[in-house]
Image (cartoon, rainbow, N blue to C red):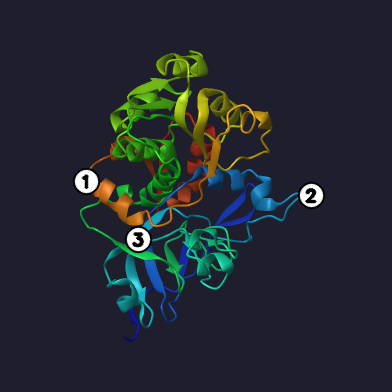
Amino acid sequence: MSAVTEKLPKTMGAVVCHAPEDYRLEERDVPKPGPGEVVIKVRSTGICASDIKCYTGAAMFWGDKKRAGYCQAPVIPGHEFVGEVVALGEGAAEAYGLAIGDHAISEQIVPCWKCKYCKMGAYWMCQVHDIYGFRQRTFGAWAEYMLFPAGALNYKVPNSIPLHHAVFIEPLACSIHAVERGDIRYQDTVVIAGCGPLGLGMVAAAKMKGPERIIALDLSDERLEVAKRTGAHLGINPKREDAVAKVRELTGGYGCDVYIEATGAPPAVEQGLLMIRKLGTFVEFSVMREPVTVDWTIIGDSKELNIHGSHLGPNCYPVAIRMIQQGLLPMDEIVTHRLPLRDYQKGIDMVLSGVTSVKVTLEP
């Protein structure tokens, strides 16, 4: 099928990342779709913790003596998003089942489909690793319009999901994948450290696995209350009580079966190693700003732990869409702030402070 497009403006407003703490609202050309490509008008886009680490100059994104930086500035940030389809390149409608006016999202990574990992089916570990919002091929959603390149994994979003809720599909897919990596069983005690948007998604996903007990950890009593409404049986604030001792007390002195780290704070790693039982499963999800140092002996000789990483949300988008559509999460308590694109700096500062918000979104 030939290309289909609405009449689009020539230019658009877009936030452009030039360097750490150097983000500017600029005028850029509206993208045009080539074969197999899709253009959306962005309706809602989230500010993620990894966006903040990039903004503040974390080595993972900008490099140091040990590694090259991942961020290819200048680039438009934003990998959490939903939009309205306004242009379809040749063949895109058939490939993705999309039509002009549909609401659509795209998985945060656009695989190369040629490297070793893509060929073995592990597309989310693609060696090229073009993630929206960080790479030159995959400009992100902090703009009025954005392009889904050929080879992207795109999905239609039901109109029944409010757009400011649909923006949570990407982080929720990541949460679901982390829970799957935990291999949760019916009699397990599961601890989820961190009740930000991703941690809350993990609580909801873990509840679907049917464990005996889900314990949420956070330094905010307000977030712990939201976690309980999302599915946690108990919330513990490590500022107020000894979380390790409490979990051991609840489990007959053994410790939790599964510990999922979603705080991004190094002390939560050691906390988990101390809290988890022998032969337990530790899932590391967070993007850490700095290296983490722990007693590695705990993992091997002391407890023989299963250590699993978790990256992105492969094969989880349909599940995330269904969970939101079925009302399994208190979305109005998760998406707490909706700002216009011009207020991107205010949004960054809110997420950076971590005090007044859960999920902050921009609406171009």
Give the class, few, some or many, for how many residues have Cα within 10 Å of label 2's Cα (few <14, many ≥20). Answer: few
The residue labelled by disc 3 is 83
Q: Name the residue under label 2.
A: 65
Q: Where is residue 211 in the image (x, y as percent from the top left)?
A: 33, 32
Task: Identify which amino acid the numbered label 1 is placed on.
Answer: Gln
Callout count: 3
Tell me the amino acid under the disc marked 2.
Lys
Query: Label 1, on which residue?
Result: 326
SS at circle 1: loop
Mark toward the start of the polypeptide (3 vs 1): 3
Residue 205 location, quadrant: top left
N-term mark: 2 or 3: 2
Q: Is residue 163 visible?
A: no
Q: Are marks 1 and 2 in contact (CB under 8 Å)?
A: no
Residue pictured at 43% horizontal, 77% vertical: 33
Discs 2/3, front: 2
Earlier sequence position, callout 1 versus callout 2: 2
Quarter in which the N terminus is drawn: bottom left
Q: How far apart are marks 1 and 2 (CA)?
A: 47 Å
Q: Is 178 left or right of 92, judged from the image as shown?
A: right
**Please, what secondary structure does the residue beneath circle 2 have?**
loop
Name the kind of residue labelled 3 in the image: Gly
Out of 22 and 118, give the one closest to the viewer.
Answer: 118
Residue 362 in the figure: left or right of residue 73? left
Q: Quick check: 1 above or below 155?
A: below
Image coordinates of residue 280 in percent, x first then y, are: 49, 32
Given residues 3 and 176, the one toward you in this image is 176
